Image (cartoon, rainbow, N blue to C red):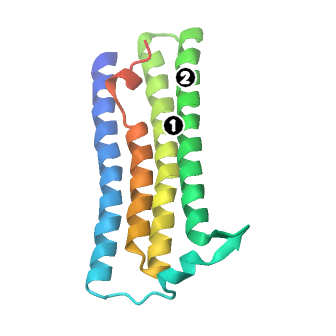
Amino acid sequence: MQSSSSEDAKAFNTLKILWFTMLNALFVYGAICYFLMAYTAYKPRYTPKVLHTPVFLGLTWLTVIYALSVTVLAIGMLHFNRVYKALVASMKTQTFESEEAASAFFRKVYTTQMFVHLAIFDAVAIVGLVVFMLTLDFSTLVNLLIIASVGFFFVMPSQAKFAYR
């Protein structure tokens, strides 16, 4: 049977690889859309002018999209911080049969939290993809990919976050 620290190291390395792969998916989204735009391989349904039409209280679609994206980012970051702190606090108060059981529980819950929040931030990038596919507005796509990547870097696994002791 492997020791808890070697299992933690393997799990941490796996998390880093998966995080990096998901981050690179954002760059792949951008690259595919760039080539669709550059080679005029795609004909959009609308022009980017539609993003500047007022939709609510004089706000344009573009303003609403950016405001919602930044709101999702902020709420996602705050929520991750809160649930991570709650996890660390619960690790200190719970009793486990062994150190391996405690470590396995932490790895499982931390991994779940990380992937849920990566999915939340990825939703911002997907909104960028939808906007691009509807309007061929590459700058909005890039801005939303940047907003999503900020969230990705916030939940990036680190040795400090992965160690609850």
Label 2's element? Answer: helix
Q: In which quarter of the image is residue 163?
A: top left
Which residue is nearer to you in this view: 141 or 105?
141
Q: Quadrant of the C terminus?
A: top left
Question: In the image, 100: left or right of 9?
Answer: right
Q: Mark 1 points at which residue?
A: 113
Q: How crowded is mark 2: few (under 14 residues within 10 Å), some or many (20 or more)?
A: some
Position of 35 relative to 103 (above/below):
below
Label 1's element? Answer: helix
Q: Quadrant of the N terminus?
A: top left
Q: Which residue is at a point 46% across and 66% down the rendered structure image?
A: 128
Q: Which residue is at a point 53% across and 50% down the rendered structure image?
A: 120
The reply to whether residue 123 is visible in this rendering is: yes
- Under mark 1, the amino acid is Gln
User: Which numbered disc, 1 or 2, marks the residue that appears first in the sequence?
Assistant: 2
Please state the horizontal and vertical placement of residue 108, each as a whole percent of the image.
47, 31
- Under mark 2, the amino acid is Lys
Q: Mark 2 points at which residue?
A: 85
Position of 162 relative to 75 (above/below):
above
Which residue is nearer to you in this view: 162 or 34?
34
Q: Which residue is at a point 38% across and 63% down the rendered structure image?
A: 142
